[in-house]
Each structure stands twice: as structure tokens, then as C-alpha cells.
Image (cartoon, grey):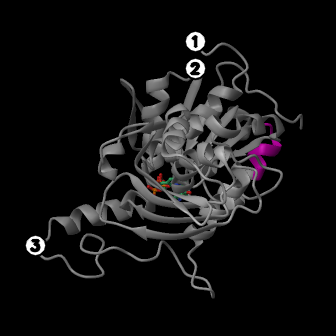
Amino acid sequence: MERGRKIVNRPRVGIVGASGLVGRTLLRVLAERRLPCRELRLFGLRAVGRELAFGARRLGVEAFEDARPSDLDLLFYAGPAALARERLAAFVEAGVLVIDKSSVHRLDPSVPLVVPELNAAALGQHAGLVATPNCTTIGVVLALAPLVALAEPDAIVVTTTQAISGVGREALEAFRAARGAAERRPGSVDGDVWTHCGALDAEGCSEEEHKLRDESRKILARPALALDATTLRVPVEVGHGASLWLRFPATLARGDVCAALERAPGVVLRTDAPGQAEVAGRDEVLVSRVRTRNAEGGSVVQLFCAVDNLRKGAATNAVQIAELLLSGPSSE
Ligand SMILES: NC(=O)c1ccc[n+]([C@@H]2O[C@H](COP(=O)([O-])OP(=O)(O)OC[C@H]3O[C@@H](n4cnc5c(N)ncnc54)[C@H](OP(=O)(O)O)[C@@H]3O)[C@@H](O)[C@H]2O)c1
């Protein structure tokens, strides 16, 4: 397959996992941004036969197992990882361009892992499949990129505070049901901070912590980036937060750090201290609480960032990738 191939103008588009949290957000973002498409097909499992809103229209959900690659030019994948592993190769081989939101292909060296504001050029290397990063990674790398461009940090410590919707629709529904209960129990989704996101490995690290480091290294093209993370799940519906601590051997002035963040595409620098849920519904990463201090001949920089995990952390990033891959003008 020709590398970097564009998608035909006005493609036939499919969404797998259309009824899920990311899938529904994709439907909203596709309608808002008016991605020109000839046809839009929705695929799922339990939602088959249901209708979902797409702008003013309603579209029915079809069984993904019946989807034929020959009916599609572009496929947004927002289903479970195991299914991506099983089914996506057949679509790619048949010439469908697949934009994958799952974690399966992100670290495959032959698959571009793209945040358009940072490494759109990597799209020139795609061979039919483009991966979009973990929702937390997207927020963190957009805040990190302008800082690592100023000077090379020798240590980065990230502590995340991730929303419940990052786990998917069932977890969000359980959270909403539990929130109605009178008692807040330790260990429950609504009454505690979970000190892990997913299973822990033999070293005590969660998969989410590995993803944040490894995906950031790939997107920023810094294979040795010294990033250590602790990922936490907090009782917030939408909006992932992250506290960043960076140590630089060079001395950095706070004014230069703020100016770099102000110039950074996809970032809004706030001088107040917004709560992380304030980012819900926005496509930019909110950066706040910027602090610098001189330390041992260098500088320490600290900040807080927040991203809407369903929009820029998932759907908007995928749609931006599709827009860059369209062969013709984006107006209908
Ligand atoms: N939530 C986030 O913040 C976020 C951010 C970035 C990436 N992601 C990734 O995006 C993907 C979707 O996440 P989500 O949060 O939207 O999950 P979700 O709310 O749990 O939705 C999962 C979707 O997958 C579909 N699905 C499950 N099994 C299927 C099958 N066998 N065939 C067809 N469709 C099937 C479901 O369809 P039915 O309802 O029809 O069964 C549902 O629409 C995951 O890979 C996740 O890791 C999530």
C-alpha cells in the first residue's frame, strides 16, 4: 500500500463503537466540524437496531460483524482493544483507512501515533492505519511540547487525576447511580480516589502509567524522555487533569515558559486556577498554575493541565487526523 495515501474526497465513513462515550462524541464532533462524507454507517454490538443522533438526523446502528470493507473508505474505531486486534487488519488490507482510538497499535513502530498540532508530518508514513494516543497522553504532550522545545528536561514527574468517563460508558453510569446514594463509601467510584488506573504489573506500575511515558516518547520523538507517572482516578465525570513537574539543567525564566505555552497550538494558558472539569466541552488543553524556581544551576517548572478526555483526548483528535488526510477541499 502507498504510504501516506489520502482518503477519497467525500468518503464513505464508518464508526465502530458509535453508542459508546467516544463514539457518541465522534458523532457530535463530525457534525460540528462538517467532515464531508458521502455516507455514515454506525456499528456496534448491543446497540444494534437503536438510532443515534447525527446533527438533525438519526442513524441506525448495524452489527459490526456484518460490516464489509468494500462499503467503506474511512473507519473510526472506538471499540474494545481485543476486537481491534482481531478485526482491523482486514479493513486495512482491503484499502479502508482506519483511525484507531484503541491502545492496540499505538506503539507499533510502523503505525503513526498522531496529535495533529505536534506531529502531523508522521501521517505521511501511514500504511492504512493511524493510531490516536491515550486520552491523558494527548493533554500531557500538548502541555509538554512547548517546554521541551525550550530546553531538554532531565526529569519529568506527572501525577494525573483522571475522570470516570475515561473508563467507558458503564463506569460512568455506575458513577452517576452511586452518586445518588446517600453514603459515600471508601473504595467506591464516587467516594474515593483510585490510586491505580487498571491492573498493576510486577513493578507496581499501571498500564496507564506505561502508556503515558511510552506514547509521549513516540509523539515527541524523544525515546529517552525521563518521564515517571502516577495515574489516579478521581470522582469527576469528564476532564482528565495532570500535574507536571519538570527539572531542567538550564535556567528558565517564568516569562519565557508562559510565552512558550501561550504560543503553543491547542493550549490555552490560564492565569486563574480553573477546576479540571471546566475543560469539558472544549477542544483545547487548559494549562494553569505555572510556577518556576531556580534549583542547582537549573530550573524546576510546575504546572497543571486539563483535557476533555472524550473530545480532544479522543474524538476531536481523530477527526482532525481525518481532515488532514482528506484529498480534496473540506467544504461540501
Ligand atoms: N473514554 C475515554 O475517555 C477514551 C479516550 C480515548 C480512547 N478511548 C478508547 O476508545 C475505545 C472506546 O472507549 P469508550 O470509553 O467509548 O467505551 P464504551 O463507552 O464502553 O463504548 C464501547 C463501545 O464499543 C462497542 N463494542 C463493544 N464490543 C463490541 C463488538 N463486539 N462489536 C462491535 N462493537 C462493540 C460498544 O457497542 P454496543 O454499545 O453496541 O455494544 C460501545 O459502543 C476504547 O478502546 C478506549 O480504550 C477511550
Q: Percent position (x, y) of residue 114? A: 67, 43
* Label 2 C-beta lies within 8 Å of the nearest ligand 1 atom: no
Q: What is the tally of numbered marks visible in this picture?
A: 3
Residue type, mark 1 in image = Ser
| Secondary structure found at label 3 | loop
Magenta stretch: includes residue 59: no
Question: Considering depth in this image, is 184 or 243 the residue closer to the camera?
Answer: 243
Q: Percent position (x, y) of residue 226? A: 67, 66
Task: For label 2, count other residues whose C-alpha is less than 10 Å away and answer few (under 14), some (14-19) or many (20+).
Answer: many
**Pointer 1 and pointer 2: residues touching (CB < 8 Å)?**
yes
| Secondary structure found at label 1 | loop
Task: For label 3, count other residues whose C-alpha is less than 10 Å away and answer few (under 14), some (14-19) or many (20+).
Answer: few
**Callout in the foreground (1, 2):** 1
Q: What residue would you read off at disc 3?
A: 182
Magenta stretch: includes residue 94: yes
Question: Considering depth in this image, is 293 or 290 the residue closer to the camera?
Answer: 293
Which of the marked residues, 2 or 3, is nearer the chain's N terminus? 2
* Residue 47 in sight: no
Residue at image coords 65%, 49%: 148
In the image, farthest residue toward the bottom? 202
Residue at image coords 57%, 12%: 331
Q: Which residues are magenta?
A: 89-95
Q: From the viewer's perspective, is 151 left or right of 208?
A: right
